[in-house]
Amino acid sequence: MEENLKRTPLYEMHLKYGARMVPFGGWDMPVQYTGVMEEHRAVREAAGLFDVSHMGEFELKGPQALELIQLVSVNNAAKLEIGQVQYSLMCYENGTIVDDILVYRLGENHYWLVVNAGNIDKDWDWVNYCLNRSGLKNLELKNLSPEVGQIAIQGPLARQIMKDLVPNVVLDELKFYWAKTGVTVAGIKSLVFSRTGYTGEDGFEIYCKKEDAVALWEALMEAGEDLGLVPAGLGARDTLRFEAKLPLYGHEINDNLTPLEAGLGFFVKLKKGTDFIGKAALEAQKEKGLERKLVGFEMIERGIARGGYEIAKDGTVVGFVTTGSFSPTLQKNIGLGYVPVAISDLGAEFDVIIRGKAVKAKIVETPFYQPRYYR
Amino acid sequence: MSNNVPAGLRYTKEHEWIKVEGNVGYVGITDFAQHHLGDVVFVEVPAVGRVLKAHEQFGVVESVKTVSDLYTPVSGKVVEVNTELESAPETVNASPYDNGWIIKIELSNPAEVDALLDAAAYDAHTKEA
């Protein structure tokens, strides 16, 4: 099975920096370089460099591009100014989640949808299916994923490291969830440069032509090394996003769960004025009230909850863990999971079933780690 | 990559070691294993007094990302567990062959030790993997 893994344009960099490679969503990706804990800490205290080239990018251009996005996306893309980025989700008719996405408005009638690596094919088929069904003709839809590399630099020192590399951008004017096109980074022309990320820290994501990715990576490492910039793998990316309660497809969200259950109702704009796929189902669910919801918890007794473990109350299984780990920042064992709304209050206790044993946990406030974005 | 394999200990293919002293042995995981696991954040040990058969699972070691079962190299009774690991599981990374030992076992069949890998054979095994 492993011989069919795809490689990002930065594969050679991972080997150079001593990464341990693992399969992830069909890709051969670095899980860690020196260690998850050390990389996690570096991102919270200084900065980390991530290869996120495996993510997918769909480009939409044309007078009806916005109409298609409004149809497939639960958020309201009509609100986007040029250069603005929006978190959203795509849902099926029944309200369950196809994927979570970023919508970039890059020009008057020019958008990118950034989708999860493991979902590129499924999402591409879905968007095309929706396009055909809609009858919209006046737009061009293109899958740029194979041609685009992406590097994320994340952490409190990301701005300082970036500053001299982008002489034509005033970073203090580029707020969180804003983007620019055609920015030259360390002499390399990028495709999209945005103040975005998936760690709960300030930072940037740089999309470039895949053949420029290595040069860009090396330039960033050189500029940041003295300030503590380190390459960071998927392991740290996961613990970082988890502490900030950023959902991961296949864990907190999937095609059995809705955005409302996942606590992402804020991004579902039922009143955006246009119909979107899943709207009726989500309206009905909102009307009726939720049966289960995503909560954050902390282990009271010794043990680490892991994704897929059962949650029980008084000996009966009532839910499941979506992500669980030792938190490097909090130095505690914490988790996210779905429980019935009736027992979802702060402070409520339940058991996580760890290797057949009931281990006590209690619901706590989330995010576990308060993000430090530049707004 | 770090792969310290002290002579004098015996090893399993599952990356446990045992250091036999008379009729008792200290059991832990190897340098190769701790390195492969990464930062150890949790160790689950058996109750003192539990009787184990050779190759039986006796505990779990968890890193940030993974959960790995621990298997005893030999049969016997658990006579002591390393309680230090409860508050300092990272000792398994820092000192896999000394302070990071996990259980002390009273051997019920010392002849089983001879069937375990010696340092050279274990070292070769890790290079195949």
Image: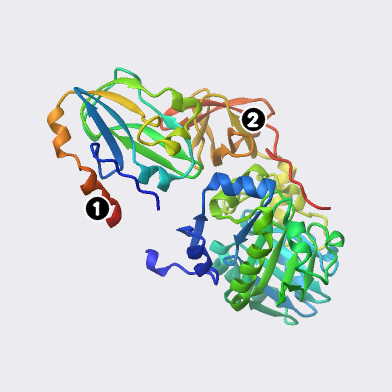
> To which chain does the residue with label 1 belong?
B
Residue A79 in which image quadrant? bottom right
Residue A172 in which image quadrant? bottom right
Nearer the observer, A263 or A186: A186
The image's colouring method is: rainbow
Q: Which residue is drawn at 55% across and 69% down?
A: A10
Residue B16 in which image quadrant? top left
Question: What's under tag 1, amino acid-wise?
Answer: Ala
> To which chain does the residue with label 2 belong?
A
Q: Name the residue under label 2.
A: A363
Q: Is residue A150 above or below residue A158?
A: below
Tell me the distance, in whole angstroms, between the alpha carbons under discs 2 and 1: 48 Å
Nearer the observer, A171 or A355: A171
A223 sits to left or right of B36:
right
Question: What's under tag 2, amino acid-wise?
Answer: Ile
Q: Is residue A356 above or below residue A77?
A: above
Q: Can residue A275 be seen in this view?
A: no
Q: Is residue B118 above or below residue B23?
A: below
